[in-house]
Image (cartoon, rainbow, N blue to C red):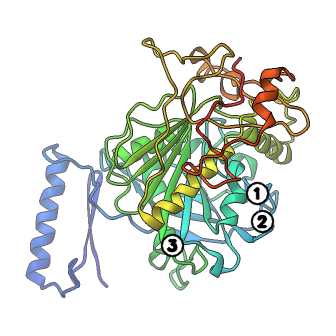
């Protein structure tokens, strides 16, 4: 197919004389008229008379290469700490690079990029559920951090759900010692990131490479397209991200970057307010991270009473990962002080409802929001426990203890303690004996029992 490419300022157009969008051959006169019209539109955009945001344009397929091997360490950043083979599951882990031209839809400006994705899939295609959760990796620590995999990896693998982590932002790619290029300058030498204004389209193109691998470009014209899905057909894509990534996904949603690629958003530890609900959104926040809008027929949000922004179930994985990859000891949880709220229960419950939604169209059941007074402060009982919210029952194994704390608004984003919370034992008072003496009444409305138990009742958690 011959192509004529027109570029004016910040916009580009590809005109094909062979066919139009209907698949019918295009006559030369029609081709000339279409290119003339398109050229006029580009000139108008350049002069500011027409919005240059290309939200209606399809997402282009990137060029994909891999699986990537070698490097200084011989394994990828974010290499799973969990065994990929266990009771009822057997997974593979592969890394791929993808590249192309990313577009800032708010301006139409384009820039070249090359980034990477880490793909984990069932070894046997027959075990694949058809669902892939694609995580916008968090870069708050100036490195790519997974937030979903450390919390619910074994549950995802047990359900046959694919996981893909995408390096969407500059701070994860370059150029400090904990970025990809800094940690392994050999393996990640080809990567190039033009800046975070292009991160949204980079994320979109990663998803496109998964959803339509046959259309992927290649770096070698004689080679076949590289398929990160290993021949498995994606039925549903779930876009996932937490904390800072939740903020970027909010812009992604409101900025029109989906363009038919994503079937559902699961946004946690932040995010909103959202303006576009054409694709449903499930949200899960800790008690101090107030969801800024009410539920609606396309949006359900849970606020967890007693849970911290970065609790131990997540931090313990990250600390071991950093000890392996960076040689850093865990100085944060040395005294077992990080919030122990078992947020993996609610994370798995929400993943359960993802599968239910795709099977039946039913959204998760609503949960009460954490109660707040007229000043916006959390209402607490005489034991310091937050009122309202999604309630868990947490048990100690041999030692009955009350686990969690609150993160006060004054420490938001200013200190590690403000994010990880704190643990302290409640001892063995009559009150805690009553809390833990009986098997909790699990609510099947919010998730499978016994794992996870996300229940609407008083949480066994003391706030500090």
Give the class, few, some or many, for how many residues have Cα within 10 Å of label 2's Cα (few <14, many ≥20). Answer: some
User: Would you place residue 378 above or below residue 277 in this image?
Assistant: above
SS class of the residue under badge 2?
loop
Q: Position of residue 37 (x, y in %)?
A: 11, 64
Frontmost residue, 393 versus 145: 393
User: Is residue 202 in view from this perspective?
Assistant: no
The residue wearing badge 3 is 234
The disc, 2 or 3, on the residue closer to the chain's N-terminal end is 2
Frontmost residue, 62 versus 340: 340
Q: Position of residue 69 (x, y in %)?
A: 74, 68
The nearer-to-camera label among 1 and 2 is: 2
Distance from label 2 to label 3 (Cα)?
Answer: 20 Å
The residue wearing badge 2 is 84
User: Is residue 200 in view from this perspective?
Assistant: yes
SS class of the residue under badge 3?
loop
Q: Is residue 415 left or right of residue 427?
A: left
Task: Tell me the quadrant of the picture where the C terminus can be found.
Answer: top right
Disc 1, disc 2: CB below 8 Å? yes
SS class of the residue under badge 1?
loop
- Label count reads 3
Distance from label 1 to label 2 (Cα)?
Answer: 8 Å
Residue visible at 49% across and 28% down in the picture: 290
Q: Residue furthest right?
A: 398
Disc 1, disc 3: CB below 8 Å? no
Give the class, few, some or many, for how many residues have Cα within 10 Å of label 3's Cα (few <14, many ≥20). Answer: some
Task: Tell me the quadrant of the picture where the N terminus can be found.
Answer: bottom left
Residue visible at 13% across and 71% down in the picture: 34
Give the class, few, some or many, for how many residues have Cα within 10 Å of label 1's Cα (few <14, many ≥20). Answer: some
């Amino acid at each position: 197919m011959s192509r004529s490419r027109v570029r004016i300022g910040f916009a580009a157009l590809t005109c094909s004389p062979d066919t139009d969008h209907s698949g019918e051959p295009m006559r030369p006169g029609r081709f000339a008229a279409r290119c003339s019209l398109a050229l006029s539109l580009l000139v108008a955009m350049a002069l500011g008379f027409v919005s240059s945001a290309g939200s209606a344009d399809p997402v282009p397929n990137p060029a994909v290469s891999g699986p990537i091997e070698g490097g200084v360490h011989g394994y990828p950043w974010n290499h799973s700490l969990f065994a990929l083979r266990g009771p009822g599951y057997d997974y593979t882990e592969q890394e791929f690079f993808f590249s192309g031209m990313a577009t800032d839809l708010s301006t139409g400006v384009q820039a070249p990029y090359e980034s990477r994705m880490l793909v984990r899939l069932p070894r046997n295609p027959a075990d694949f559920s058809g669902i892939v959760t694609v995580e916008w990796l968090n870069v708050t620590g100036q490195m790519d951090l997974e937030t979903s995999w450390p919390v619910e990896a074994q549950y995802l693998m047990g359900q046959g759900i694919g996981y893909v982590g995408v390096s969407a932002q500059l701070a994860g790619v370059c150029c400090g010692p904990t970025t990809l290029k800094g940690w392994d300058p050999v393996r990640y030498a080809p990567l190039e990131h033009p800046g975070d204004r292009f991160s949204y389209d980079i994320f979109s193109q990663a998803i496109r490479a998964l959803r339509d691998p046959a259309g992927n470009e290649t770096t070698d014209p004689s080679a076949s397209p590289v398929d990160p899905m290993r021949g498995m057909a994606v039925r549903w894509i779930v876009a996932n991200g937490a904390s800072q990534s939740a903020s970027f996904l909010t812009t992604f949603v409101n900025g029109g970057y989906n363009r038919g690629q994503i079937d559902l958003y699961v946004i946690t530890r932040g995010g909103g307010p959202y303006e576009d609900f054409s694709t449903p959104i499930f949200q899960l926040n800790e008690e101090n991270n107030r969801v800024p809008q009410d539920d609606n027929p396309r949006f359900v949000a849970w606020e967890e009473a007693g849970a911290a922004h970065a609790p131990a179930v997540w931090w313990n994985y990250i600390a071991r990962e950093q000890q392996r990859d960076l040689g850093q000891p865990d100085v944060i949880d040395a005294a077992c002080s990080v919030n122990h709220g078992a947020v993996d229960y609610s994370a798995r419950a929400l993943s359960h409802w993802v599968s239910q939604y795709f099977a039946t169209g039913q959204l998760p059941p609503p949960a009460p929001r954490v109660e707040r007074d007229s000043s916006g402060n959390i209402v607490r009982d005489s034991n310091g426990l937050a009122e309202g919210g999604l309630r868990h029952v947490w048990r100690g194994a041999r030692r009955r203890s009350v686990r969690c704390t609150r993160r006060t608004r004054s420490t938001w984003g200013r200190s590690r303690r403000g994010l990880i919370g704190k643990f302290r034992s409640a001892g063995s008072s009559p009150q805690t004996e009553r809390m833990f003496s009986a098997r909790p009444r699990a609510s099947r409305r919010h998730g499978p029992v016994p794992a996870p138990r996300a229940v609407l009742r008083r949480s066994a958690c003391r706030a500090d």
